[in-house]
Amino acid sequence: MIKMIALDLDETLLNTDKTISEENATALRQLHEAGIKIVLCTGRPINAIWHYLEQLGLTTDDDYTITFNGALVIQNSTKEALAQSGLSRNDFEPLHAFAAANHYPMDVLDFDQVYPIADLTPSVYEQMLKAPMKFIPTAFADLPDQLFSKAVMATDAAILDQVVAKLTPELTKLYHVVRSQPKILEFLAADMDKAVGLGQLLTHFGWDFSDLMAFGDAENDLGMIKAAGDGVAMQNGQPAVKAAANHQTPVDNNHAGVAAYLQHVFPELLG
């Protein structure tokens, strides 16, 4: 029995214009009111998606969000962490050396702010993220000794294609590398993805992955798609995601694909 629905944002729940259609919002609000947990799963911080949480009514004391691609499980109304994990400054040293040698940009994120690495090629991450987070340009050697959620490279898609082609076996072993958007490449702890955060949240409620339905479209959704009792790929999803999924939405993200699938699965609740 599905007790929790996890949803990626970009090209999944969101239209290409970064809005939630009224069809998707209405279906999710109705299921939330019926007692099913609705959990947004994103690489962004919670403040950057707060308007989506408000639109869906996910602001009660029992609502949670998976942020930073699984590294932080956060209670929505209090902003308190249920679970968090990440990497140290030393963990990013091989990635910094790789970026410096190849003239790539790099930003390092903790759970509150972003550190564009000032001794590397300038990054466009701040312009792309458009989120209420503080950006503090910092030389890599001056990063604070604390826990970080991830690093990102944000640049032209063609340059990121080159980055992916040049990644060494050492780097792919050290980090879980995911292309969350055409212009954003993320470097997480080796064992980190959205399924990690969802597993922690399911355990909190006394459930397991058989109780989870998960929607996604891209490679940073693969973990939760594979782990979920019902992993659902968007019609517009990447081939690898579709291959891993149990089901596929009948229409794409710009035609309320999430709502169309939910209407099929929960007709008694959404009739």
Image (tube, helix red, strand yellow):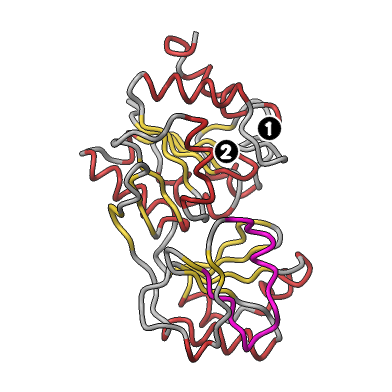
- Give amino acid for label 1: Asp
Q: Which mark is residue 233?
A: 2
Residues under labels 2 and 1: Cα distance?
10 Å
Q: Helix, strand or loop at disc 1?
A: loop
- The residue range painted magenta reads 114-131
Q: Residue at x 47, y 46 (%)?
A: 41
Image coords of residue 90 (percent x, y):
41, 86
In the rendering, which numbered label is found on residue 252? 1
* For residue 162, above or below residue 209: below
What residue lies at 60% left-to-right and 50% top-to-bottom? 218
Question: In this image, 99 relative to 95: left or right?
Answer: right
Callout 2: helix, strand or loop? strand
- Counting from the top left corner in percent of width and height, residue 265 is at 47, 19
Residue found at the very far left of the displayed protein: 206
Residue at (36% x, 32% y) in the render: 37
Check the picture and name the quadrant holding the N terminus: top left
Q: Nearer the viewer, residue 16 or 137?
A: 137
